[in-house]
Image (cartoon, rainbow, N blue to C red):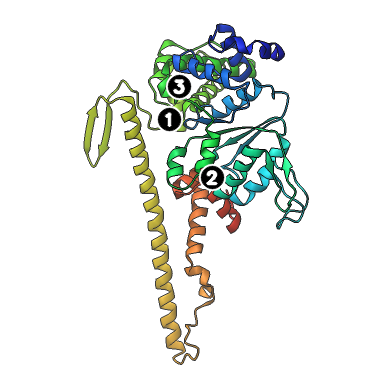
Amino acid sequence: MEEKWHGEIRMVHDVLDDKTMDFLRDRFGIIGESDIMRDIMLQLLKVSPTNLTVLITGETGTGKEVFAHAMHGLSERSTQPFISVNCGAIPETLLESELFGHEKGAFTGAVEQRKGFFEVAHKGTIFLDEIGEMPIATQVKLLRILESGEFSRIGSSEIRKVNVRVITATNRDLEYEVRNGRFRQDLYFRLNSFQLRLPPLRKHPEDIPVLAEYYASRIAKKNKFSYKGFTDDAFEYLTSLSWPGNIRELRNVVETVSTLDHGKQITQSMLSQQIQDHGGNQGTIPTDQAIVVSTHGYQRNSQLPQESDIVFRTLLEMKNELIEIKRAMAAIFEKTAQLEMQAQRAAEQSITEFPVITNHSLPFPDEYSSDAQFNLEEMEKQLIQSALTKYAGNRRMAAKILGISERTLYRKITDYQLSEQ
């Protein structure tokens, strides 16, 4: 089937027929009947057979990796490796080694020679997700390999060459990152040979029913129970939501409801209960209803467009996060004040018992003999541990409440040897 598809792909560049759409759905899970999704699919079919570097942009959960897989599968490289790398999930100190490899003894812990992802992907495709998280120093080496195909492993002066197609993705505005000096302009221009912009789900709500049916029928088949579909009010409910988590959030909700109810016909009440019980679509407001925002007893009702719904929801989430941060800081200050009071009492007691101090230092009790008790680093360590404990080791939530990136949190956990439970 795949060989036949490669032979026919040039014939469908300007026409997206039912057969093509069925193939994209069944082979890669790319679904949509709206005009905006049809246009995206046509762009996918045009760029896939080429060797162009592609930048996929879009909000979290819009399916960037799905489209990257499809580009590889629809190319002449489809029989070669496809390597997916999340640049934001790998610590800065390890990312360069993971991408380009290293020689034995190149750094502490390099006990053997290791190939990098680019070598492993030779003749195939490498997908660099969250490219906006890549450190500047690594960006330089990436630019070199894009321009010439050349690189060298860490700890080696030998120049190596690879033949790799590069696809990248980000939910950041890279032009903004370039203006602020966090991303190289020359690399941005090189990555942006072709840009595929994936729309958020709220921009094509007419695709929600077909997406929901696809995920529900797939999970029913996987769990070997019959699929009985959705009620009309269930579809109306799903399309009324803004879906901040986009397709990923919709899929999770539908698959969970389908699994828990063992293939029963899915109703609005089943969906709304799942969302309320598990915090999914939190803060999502039906676009055809009035918004009620309550702050210090003040209420505001209005008919707002969908974009304004998102702004209000974001502001409310930011407010809740600020409250959590203030609580955490208040706890730190309270703990600091307690330590200072205890230290002062200990000092006064020591002065009473030892009026003559020859070395001009206070003889603190054993529990205060270490400077760590008063060290900002220790406070940071305690705060990070508290956040990890609060969210049961969920790094994403802990990093969010601490106001740092997941990569920074990962480094801090390693440095402080913290428990993630």
Q: Residue at x 58, y 25 (%)?
A: 66
Label 1 or label 3, whichever comes before in sequence order: 1
Q: Which mark is residue 301?
A: none
Residues at marks 1 and 2, CA–CA distance in whole angstroms: 20 Å
Q: Nearer the viewer, mark 1 or mark 2?
A: 1
**Res. 218 image quadrant:** top right
Q: Which residue is mark 3?
A: 271
Number of the label disc, if any, that sits on residue 395: 2
Of labels 1 and 2, earlier in sequence is: 1
Identify the residue shown where x is 33% and y is 25%: 306
In space, the residues marked 3 and 2 are separated at their CA atoms by: 27 Å
Instruction: Residue 181 in the image: state x and y as whole percent.
Output: 46, 48
Please tell me whether mark 3 sits on a helix, a strand or a loop. helix
User: Along the horizontal axis of the image, is 69 left or right of 308?
Assistant: right
Residue 206 spot, x, y in % from top left: 43, 15
What's the residue at 43%, 80% (across, down)? 347
Graded by Cα atoms within 10 Å as few (under 14), some (14 to 19) or many (20 or more), the crowding at tag 1 reads: many
**In the image, what residue type sits under mark 3?**
Leu
Q: Nearer the viewer, residue 237 or 80?
A: 80
Splitting the image into 4 quarters, where does residue 340 fall? bottom left
User: Residue 19 location, x and y as percent?
Assistant: 59, 7
The residue under label 1 is 244
Residue 219 position in % (x across, y down): 59, 19
Amino acid at dot 2: Arg
Above-or-below relation of 239 to 295: above
Q: Where 374 sits versus 405, above or below?
A: below
Q: Residue at x 32, y 34 (%)?
A: 312
Characterize the local packing of mark 2: few (<14), some (14-19) or many (20 or more) Cα atoms within 10 angstroms.
some
Q: Secondary structure at mark 2?
A: helix
**Mark 3 nearby-residue class (10 Å; few <14, some 14–19, many ≥20):** some
